[in-house]
Amino acid sequence: MSDRITDIHAIRDVVALYCRGIDRLDFDLVRQAYHDDGIDHHTGFDGTVGGYVSWVSKSLEYLAGTMHFIGNHHVDFVDQDTAISETYVMATHWGPPGSGRRANFTTGARYVDLMERRAGRWAIAERWAVREWTRPDVFVAPEQPGPRGTRDAADPLPVLMKRFGL
């Protein structure tokens, strides 16, 4: 049983790695979430992981930010090295000041992933990003001064990780 718990945790980490990569524009992390021959089916894209990374990086460059929240997560094991993972996600997207509805929205989705363990590493073999709903949003400036996220090396996370050599 403990091996299954370890596998479930490793599979959930793949999903979290993907979300971190998208939100921080770290496309090496996004690529790591997939096997090299991985396939992605997204709204507006259907193809290989290489094509997906190229497409999503261009899709996100006009946005000021994204934030993905992982909710319910369930794993069904097909065999020792194959699993089907379903993860509920809410993803908020926002554009620069003055951008319209196309850049400012929250969407509810499910990541339905065929996960495979190859050479001891769990990763996405095929993903279906199933969009369930989308809601336009209106964003306002933060109410007080304080730390703000960035999508580069100045963000608090890479600053702290660098401090400890991570």
Image: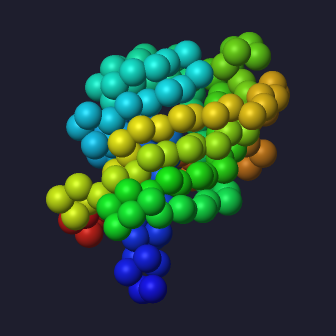
The quadrant in which residue 26 appears is top left
Can you say which quadrant of the picture contains the N terminus? bottom left
- Which quadrant would the C terminus be assigned to in this image? bottom left
Could you tell whether 150 is left or right of 34 in the image? right
Camera-side residue: 56 or 141?
56
Question: Compared with residue 63, is residue 109 higher up or lower down, i.e. above or below?
Answer: below
Residue 54 occupies which quadrant of the picture? top left
Front-most of residues 50 and 104: 50
State the image coordinates of residue 10 (x, y, percent, origin top left): 39, 66
The residue located at (59%, 22%) in the rendering is 43
Report whether 88 appears left or right of 52.
right
Q: Report the residue at 75% width, 34% height from top.
A: 132
Color scheme of the displayed model: rainbow
Depth order, front residue of 39/19: 39
- In this rendered view, identify the residue nearer to me: 77 or 125: 77
Q: Residue 78 placed where, x, y %?
A: 45, 60
Q: Identify the residue at the far left of this view.
A: 119
Residue 52 location in percent, x, y? 39, 24
Find the residue positioned furthest to the front: 79
